[in-house]
Amino acid sequence: MVGHKDDTNWARFITQVFEQAKPYLAVRGDLMHARISHEYAMSLMKQEGGDRKIIEPAIILHDVGWSCLGAREIKTAYGVKAEGLESERLNRIHEKEGAAVARRILEHIHYDPLLIDKIASIIRTHDSGEDIRSLEEAVVKDADKLWRFSETGFSKEIERQGITAIELYRHLAEHHETWFCTQSAFEIAARELEKRKRQSSRKV
Ligand SMILES: [Fe+2]
Ligand SMILES: [Fe+2]
């Protein structure tokens, strides 16, 4: 089993999780999303707490399930313009398949089975779950959503979804007050949103 008692072992383990996740994340171009959301998860943990043994692998692996869908299905399932039953169905597939792929990756590197269960359970509903069952789940969901407020995430989502900076800014401004589980994430989002406002007005 991979040790987590000291930071060197832990850093090595995290590198290994990223390495294992890379081919799956590459399908939708999500490696940068995983890296930036992982950074947000680290910041949130400093302020909110939570178990890094669950949070870090879960946020790195949360989107590996997109690898099980085709390019057209991904476009239907995701983004500002995604809506309707088909979009819902495909989005649930990325959660369900993501939990299964994450489980396989973590079993392959001999991670603790009890932790794998908790991580898979968070990934299984990371987009859809409304009942927050743990602090770890709250941090993972918030770190995932914060990506789109970051400078890199904002630009990447405009390109990926084929929308304008103003459209994305308006979408974030409209939803950011209800999206987050933790106060820390809400505050980060509000700060970043101000910067994206300036970024999007420069592009008009
Ligand atoms: Fe996702
Ligand atoms: Fe995500």
Image (tube, rainbow, N blue to C red):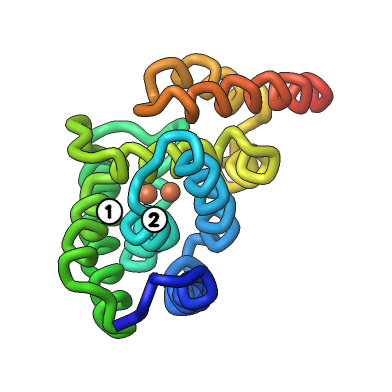
In this view, 92 is above or below 81: below
Which one is in front, 1 or 101?
A: 1
Q: Mark 1 — residue?
A: 123
Residue drawn where x is 29% and y is 47% of the image:
91
**What residue appears at the point 44 percent right and 23 percent down from the top-left corner?**
183
**Residue at disc 2, secondary structure:** helix
Q: Which residue is mark 2?
A: 52
Question: Residue at the spot x=48%, y=39% of the render?
Answer: 44
Residue 31 appears anywhere in the view: yes
Please rate how many residues cluster around mark 2, counting C-alpha atoms within 10 Å: few if below 14, some from 14 to 19, many from 20: some
Figure quadrant of the C terminus = top right
Residue drawn 48% across the image and 46% down it: 41
Quadrant of the drawing holding the N terminus: bottom left
Q: Nearer the viewer, mark 2 or mark 1?
A: 2
Q: Position of residue 100 (x, y in %)?
A: 22, 68
Question: In the rendering, at what x and y percent does residue 31 appear?
Answer: 55, 63
Question: Is label 2 within 8 A of ligand 2 (CB to nearest ligand atom)?
Answer: no
Total labels drawn: 2
